[in-house]
């Protein structure tokens, strides 16, 4: 990479966005920032603009942007100056900008799971047609991306899960878990929604769906294994029985850097060398689906296909918000999502407009159902 890579970051004030800027700060001679976008955190956005000097910026209140030209999100994603766009927003708002960038032939570093959970078939098909690279930022998928040489020779994907804060707690403890306990993740520092998803293991469920689309792998060939140390970020098994795993210290800086510098590698933000002797031991165990039934729910939604994963994502997200607002208990997130899945009439091949329509409808129904419960 001789000339600077031109990048835009969607969601630059979030957890992934701010860490991406830390990576870019270390690799200043490698990157030029075209645009930064945020939602409502305009103070931090303006600090980032002053420091990183992007040409353009976007936020919900354009008048408050200082030091960069306001550009609508659509125009940022179709701007041909971009070599790559890091989609680091959380939730369904990631889908349309990602599609826009793909249609314009711009490579994607994808940190937004919902894009693939909601519309994986459409997104991957369009990316293939447009010759666009989608490099995953999610640590497990980034690991698998690094392990795969030839996908046609891979027998299965093995996704690791840290197990979250309730791994060895009893089912009764999980049922009465508080918001504070659910947000105390032992290994990863992430946003609130994904941290709750990690506590219920729904995050792993969403990652199974994400992996299915990214690597075109049947659900029966995607396994989950609990690995509390979060050193092995995921693995693949080849047809001949060889297993290739990607290891590293649990830091999101590494997968973010990989995704935005791919196919190159630089020293960048790495602070210390990896030491097997310091780590000393790696543990693995089967996931307990009695305690964490959300994983099975996600497998089923994925296998059903069509709008099932749209329903799963929308119902789960609304239930997580209700839990964070202390309206429901942690285990209710599963029960509510399961109930909404049972009620949902599957649409086989939804269009993008239908996906957004279904998403909206499920969210309204989920909120109504939660109201009845509380
Ligand atoms: Mg992950």
Image: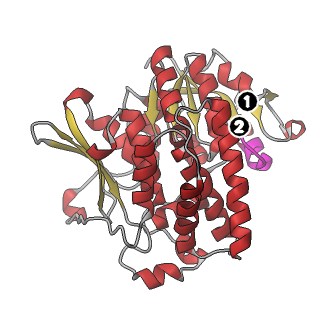
Q: Is residue 47 above or below residue 321?
A: above
- Quadrant in the picture for residue 142: top left
Which of discs 1 and 2 lies nearer the camera? The answer is 1
In screen coordinates, is 159 left or right of 164? Answer: left
- Quadrant in the picture for residue 84: top right
Please tell me whether mark 2 sits on a helix, a strand or a loop.
strand
Which residue is identified by label 1? 73
Q: Is mark 1 within 8 Å of ligand 1?
A: no
Q: In the rendered structure, are the residues bearing label 1 and label 2 in contact, judged by CB atoms less than 8 Å apart?
A: yes
Q: Residue at x 69, y 65 (%)?
A: 369
Q: Is residue 49 magenta?
A: no
Q: Is residue 200 above or below residue 349?
A: below
Q: Is residue 112 visible?
A: no
Q: Which mark is residue 37?
A: 2
Front-most of 196 and 108?
A: 196
Q: Position of residue 313 (x, y in %)?
A: 57, 51
Please tell me whether mark 1 sits on a helix, a strand or a loop.
helix
Count the numbered circles shown: 2
Q: Residue at x 78, y 39 (%)?
A: 59
**Number of residues whose C-alpha sits closer than 10 Å to that of mark 2, classed few (under 14), some (14–19) or many (20 or more):** many
Q: Is residue 38 magenta?
A: yes
Magenta span covers which residues? 37-47
Q: Position of residue 35 (x, y in %)?
A: 68, 29
Q: Is residue 137 visible?
A: yes
Q: Residue at x 44, y 57 (%)?
A: 297
Q: Position of residue 253 (x, y in %)?
A: 46, 46
Q: Position of residue 314 (x, y in %)?
A: 62, 51
In screen coordinates, is 25 left or right of 268? Answer: right
């Amino acid at each position: 990479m001789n000339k600077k890579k031109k990048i835009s970051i969607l969601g630059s004030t979030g957890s992934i966005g701010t860490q991406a800027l830390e990576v870019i700060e270390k690799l200043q001679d490698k990157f030029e920032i075209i645009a930064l976008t945020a939602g409502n955190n305009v103070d931090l956005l303006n600090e980032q603009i002053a420091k990183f000097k992007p040409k353009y910026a976007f936020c919900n209140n354009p008048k408050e942007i200082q030091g960069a030209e306001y550009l609508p999100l659509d125009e940022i994603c179709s701007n041909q100056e971009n070599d790559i766009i890091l989609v680091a927003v959380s939730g369904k708002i990631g889908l349309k900008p990602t599609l826009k960038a793909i249609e314009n032939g711009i490579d994607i570093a994808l940190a937004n799971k919902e894009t693939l959970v909601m519309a994986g078939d459409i997104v991957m098909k369009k990316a293939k047609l447009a010759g666009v690279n989608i490099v995953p930022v999610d640590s497990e998928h980034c690991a698998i991306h690094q392990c795969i040489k030839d996908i046609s020779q891979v027998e299965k994907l093995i996704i690791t899960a840290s197990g979250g804060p309730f791994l060895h707690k009893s089912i009764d403890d999980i049922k009465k878990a508080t918001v504070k306990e659910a947000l105390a993740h032992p290994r990863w520092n992430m946003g609130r929604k994904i941290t709750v998803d990690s506590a219920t293991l729904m995050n792993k469920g969403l990652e199974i769906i994400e992996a299915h689309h990214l690597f075109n792998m049947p659900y029966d060939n995607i396994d989950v294994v609990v690995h509390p140390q979060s050193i092995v970020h995921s693995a693949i098994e080849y047809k001949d029985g060889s297993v290739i795993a990607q290891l590293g210290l649990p830091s999101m800086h590494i997968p973010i850097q990989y995704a935005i510098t791919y196919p190159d590698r630089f020293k960048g933000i790495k602070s210390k060398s990896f030491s097997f002797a310091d780590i000393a031991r790696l543990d693995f165990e089967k996931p307990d689906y009695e305690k964490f039934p959300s994983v099975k729910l996600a497998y089923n939604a994925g296998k059903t296909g069509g709008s099932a994963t749209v329903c799963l994502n929308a119902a789960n997200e609304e239930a997580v918000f209700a839990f964070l607002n202390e309206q429901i208990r942690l285990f209710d997130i599963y029960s509510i999502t399961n109930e909404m899945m049972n009620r949902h009439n599957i649409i086989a091949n939804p269009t993008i407009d239908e996906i957004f329509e279904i998403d909206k409808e499920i969210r309204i129904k989920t909120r109504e159902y939660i109201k009845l419960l509380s």
